[in-house]
Image (spheres, grey):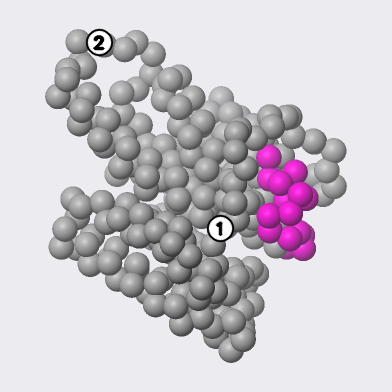
């Protein structure tokens, strides 16, 4: 990648710095949330929202690119974890997700070599739109119990609805529901009437203050688990896992979804 230094001016630098900070403040919690959707502890989303973007930005030959966490692959990984009866956030989940990621990368490399992107032209837009809408609905049903004071669900629609019912019956927390509902209303209203204001940043700051002041603990509002200081230990994933054929088929599905979403987004 060739950097043109004459493109940088004090005005551009200040604007880009401000934009980068805002995007980071928004993307980091989103990445932590999607890590939980994929069955991983939130800390993996924290580091996953930083290092891959830096590496991709330094190696990319384009001045413009779309890069970030995506709901569909996270939900597919989380569904795979659930079907194998692996507890989300467990050591087993932490060990198997990197293996899935490696095979997804291998499939994507093969698709690039054989130029499989041409097949995207035969994918119907309504079909892809329906698929993404279903993924969105699944994530909403998975995360709604957290807003109500419970824990996220897993499985098919019936199991997710049953988990929501049990949460309302046994674990409902009015303060959690009030905070979650208020945050959602603020985000939706601000997006419509003041779209240039990064309301999500203000919502996150307010949430942090609620936790820091002890209000959350006083009213049994669940907080994210503490994150250890320092970088996590880097190690190569253990490829000696059971159910390799299932991992291969799941990773192929994820790679196809990533390729289709990316190419369709680029063409749009």
How busy is the neighbourhood of tag 1: few (under 14 within 10 Å), some, or many (20 plus)?
A: few
SS for tag 2?
A: helix
Q: Which label belongs to residue 179?
A: none
Q: Which residue is mark 2?
A: 5
Q: Is residue 172 visible?
A: yes
- In this orientation, does residue 262 appear? no
In the rendered structure, does residue 87 fall within the stretch colored magenta? yes
Q: Position of residue 123 (x, y in %)?
A: 44, 50
Q: In the displayed structure, does residue 82 sit left or right of residue 71?
A: right
Of residues 119 and 8, which is closer to you in this image? 8
Q: Where's residue 99, x and y in %? A: 71, 39
Residue range of the region highlighted in magenta in the rendering: 83-98
Horizontally, residue 238 falls left or right of residue 222, namely: right
Question: Could you tell me residue 81's position as x and y percent?
Answer: 70, 57
**Circle 1 residue:** 224
Indicate the secondary structure of the residue bearing disc 1. loop
Q: In whole angstroms, how far apart are the C-alphas of marks 1 and 2?
A: 42 Å
């Amino acid at each position: 990648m060739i950097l043109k230094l004459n493109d940088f001016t004090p005005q551009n630098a200040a604007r880009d710095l401000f934009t980068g900070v805002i995007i980071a403040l928004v993307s980091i919690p989103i990445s932590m949330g999607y890590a939980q959707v994929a069955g991983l502890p939130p800390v993996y989303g924290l580091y996953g929202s930083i290092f891959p973007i830096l590496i991709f930005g330094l190696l990319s030959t384009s001045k413009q690119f779309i890069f970030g966490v995506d709901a569909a692959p996270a939900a597919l990984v989380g569904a795979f974890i659930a079907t194998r009866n692996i507890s989300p956030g467990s050591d087993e989940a932490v060990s198997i997700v990197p293996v899935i990621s490696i095979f997804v990368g291998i499939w994507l490399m093969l698709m690039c070599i054989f130029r499989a992107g041409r097949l995207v032209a035969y994918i119907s837009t309504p079909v892809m739109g329906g698929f993404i809408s279903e993924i969105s609905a699944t994530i909403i049903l998975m995360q709604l119990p957290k807003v109500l004071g419970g824990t996220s669900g897993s499985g098919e629609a019936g199991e997710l609805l049953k988990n929501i019912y049990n949460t309302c019956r046994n674990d409902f927390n009015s303060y959690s529901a009030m905070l979650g509902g208020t945050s959602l209303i603020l985000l939706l209203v601000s997006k419509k009437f003041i779209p240039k204001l990064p309301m999500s940043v203000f919502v996150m700051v307010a949430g942090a203050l609620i936790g820091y002041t002890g209000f959350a603990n006083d009213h049994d509002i669940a907080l994210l688990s503490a994150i250890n200081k320092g970088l996590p230990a880097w190690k190569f994933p253990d490829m000696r896992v059971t159910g390799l054929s299932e991992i291969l088929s799941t990773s192929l599905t994820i790679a196809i979804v990533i390729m289709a979403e990316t190419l369709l987004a680029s063409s749009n």
